[in-house]
């Protein structure tokens, strides 16, 4: 399993990676890397092949265009454009567009693409050429096999939140998992393949398209808590947990990766595998912190926790200029390890001249060193600080509607 998996991954994603010490055979014959097939190449599938492929994924193959296209001649459509302008800066709207990711800069390449600016040209940029709106494991398998057979670049997208722009790419097929929304609970979950008699665990079972807000609500209704991220529209199965996954409950219950019980994943060879403590352990290890790229997770199972209250502090910090903001940020980051030792989870979106600071003290619910605000104010006297304190009942999902992520 070690060898065949890593080799097939090398062939498909072009990454040199060894999960074990390379043997002499591996060193002597490195895998052949091929450039991906482009629409201008002879290897690119013709129209009939695309149509045929579309039928194999339930006619959910979408020819993908940039989201602002209908605001640009010759595609200009005034009504559609007004809708686009309304949604353009909303994460919930962006999540629902096959051609969008959260940060529009990732939709462009060297300044070329299609933004709202109507005087600039509208080109495809980094927006995938096709999107498969996947609804089942079979859709995922079929798409991976098609992309692999035709040597076409494949990207995986749930929400498009990725800070590194990894959920969009030029000349690619996008495998869009966002509508795989199944959520189940099991209060005696045992990973598949666990020895008979293994004690069951309280768990939430999530299909790949679920976002944290949906998981929090479901957990709340089931009188459980789950370690997720701060932002409601971040996905539960993708880059968040596979890269670690930090959230308001982390000081108490660990990172998301500390709570994973099992993944179901379609690997680059198009095969569905189960990764847990009892089978495909190397893959299970990689998926808990190695970052997304080991395959397409179709189902994640996370431990849940008993409900408890915690305090959430949301501060909006406004500074007169960027230099002051930099000083504030430095002061804040200098405090961060102590805050963490005190059991507080902190989150601070990248500042310009104003930023939100979200602190969720969780251990043992009322931390010893509160409030933080005076210490920050001492560092930067010009600071204008507005804090809201609230005790959160049971689950992080009951958020203030104006709260940022
Ligand atoms: C506003 C905001 C708030 C955030 N808050 C937090 C936070 O509180 N804590 C924290 O730890 N992080 C936070 N993040 C970072 C976030 O966890 C990462 O950006 C993460 O990669 C987003 O994952 P996604 O699945 O929602 O996004 P996507 O862009 O859809 O996917 C992210 C990556 O995962 C891959 N991927 C998606 N689904 C799958 C799948 N099913 N199988 C395999 N690969 C997949 C994609 O290819 C891409 O590489 C935040 C990000 C934003 C933009
Ligand atoms: C819009 O595009 C034009 C042409 O590329 C450019 O000159 C202008 O600066 C852009 N405007 C904004 C606000 O980015």
Image: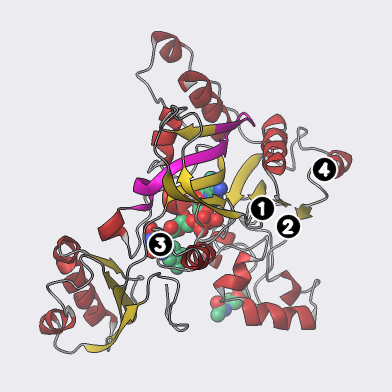
Which numbered disc, 1 or 4, marks the residue that appears first in the sequence? 4
Disc 3: which residue:
225
Q: CA distance from mark 2 to mark 1?
A: 6 Å
Q: CA distance from mark 1 to mark 3?
A: 36 Å
Q: CA distance from mark 2 to mark 3?
A: 37 Å
Magenta span:
255-273
25 vs 117, nearest the viewer: 25
Q: CA distance from mark 1 to mark 4?
A: 14 Å
Label 4: state its secondary structure. helix
Classify residue 74 as left or right of residue 151.
right
Disc 4: which residue:
50
* Label 2 close to label 1 by CB (< 8 Å): yes
Q: Residues within 10 Å of mark 1 (few under 14, many from 20)?
A: many
Residue 308 higher or lower than 139, as above or below: below
Which numbered disc, 2 or 1, marks the residue that appears first in the sequence? 2
Residue 78 higher or lower than 125, as above or below: below
256 vs 134, nearest the viewer: 256
Label 2: state its secondary structure. loop
Label 1: state its secondary structure. loop
Residue 64: which disc? Answer: 2
Residue 128: which disc? Answer: 1
Does 267 lie within the magenta span? yes
Q: Is residue 259 visible?
A: yes
Residue 22 image position (x, y, % from top left): 38, 17
Residue 291 image position (x, y, % from top left): 43, 44
Residue 172 image position (x, y, % from top left): 66, 46
Residue 278 higher or lower than 171, as above or below: above
């Amino acid at each position: 399993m070690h060898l065949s998996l890593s080799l097939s991954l090398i062939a498909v994603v072009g990454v040199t990676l060894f999960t074990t010490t390379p043997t002499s055979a591996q060193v002597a014959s490195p895998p052949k890397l091929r450039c991906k097939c482009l629409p201008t190449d002879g290897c690119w599938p013709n129209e009939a092949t695309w149509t045929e492929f579309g039928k194999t994924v339930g006619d959910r193959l979408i020819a993908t265009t940039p989201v602002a296209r209908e605001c640009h001649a010759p595609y200009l459509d005034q009504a559609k454009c007004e809708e686009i302008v309304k949604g353009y800066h909303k994460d919930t709207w962006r999540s629902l567009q096959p051609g969008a990711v959260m940060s529009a800069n990732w939709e462009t390449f060297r300044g070329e693409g299609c933004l709202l600016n109507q005087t600039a040209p509208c080109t495809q940029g980094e927006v995938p050429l096709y999107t498969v709106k996947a609804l089942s494991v079979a859709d995922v398998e079929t798409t991976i096999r098609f992309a692999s057979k035709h040597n076409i670049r494949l990207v995986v997208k749930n929400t498009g939140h990725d800070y590194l722009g990894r959920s969009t790419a030029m000349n690619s097929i996008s495998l869009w998992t966002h509508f795989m929304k199944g959520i189940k609970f099991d209060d005696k979950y045992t990973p598949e393949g666990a020895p008979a008699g293994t004690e069951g665990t309280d768990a939430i079972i999530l299909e790949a398209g679920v976002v944290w807000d949906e998981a929090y609500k479901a957990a709340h209704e089931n009188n459980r808590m789950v370690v997720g991220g701060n932002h409601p529209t971040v996905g539960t199965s993708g880059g968040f947990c596979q890269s670690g996954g930090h959230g308001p409950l982390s000081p108490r219950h660990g990172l998301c990766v500390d709570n994973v019980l099992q993944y179901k994943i379609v690997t680059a060879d198009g095969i569905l595998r189960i990764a847990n403590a009892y089978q495909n352990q190397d893959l299970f290890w990689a998926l808990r912190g190695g970052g997304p790229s080991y395959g397409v997770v179709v189902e994640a199972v996370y431990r849940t926790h008993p409900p408890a209250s915690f305090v959430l502090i949301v501060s909006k910090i406004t500074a007169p200029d960027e230099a002051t903001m930099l000083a504030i940020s430095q002061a804040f980051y200098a405090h961060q390890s102590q805050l963490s030792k005190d059991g507080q989870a902190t989150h601070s979106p990248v500042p310009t001249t104003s930023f939100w600071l979200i602190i969720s003290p969780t251990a043992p619910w009322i931390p010893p060193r509160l409030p933080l605000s005076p210490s920050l104010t001492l560092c930067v006297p010009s600071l204008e600080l507005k804090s809201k304190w609230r005790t959160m009942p049971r689950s992080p999902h009951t958020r203030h509607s104006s709260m940022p992520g």
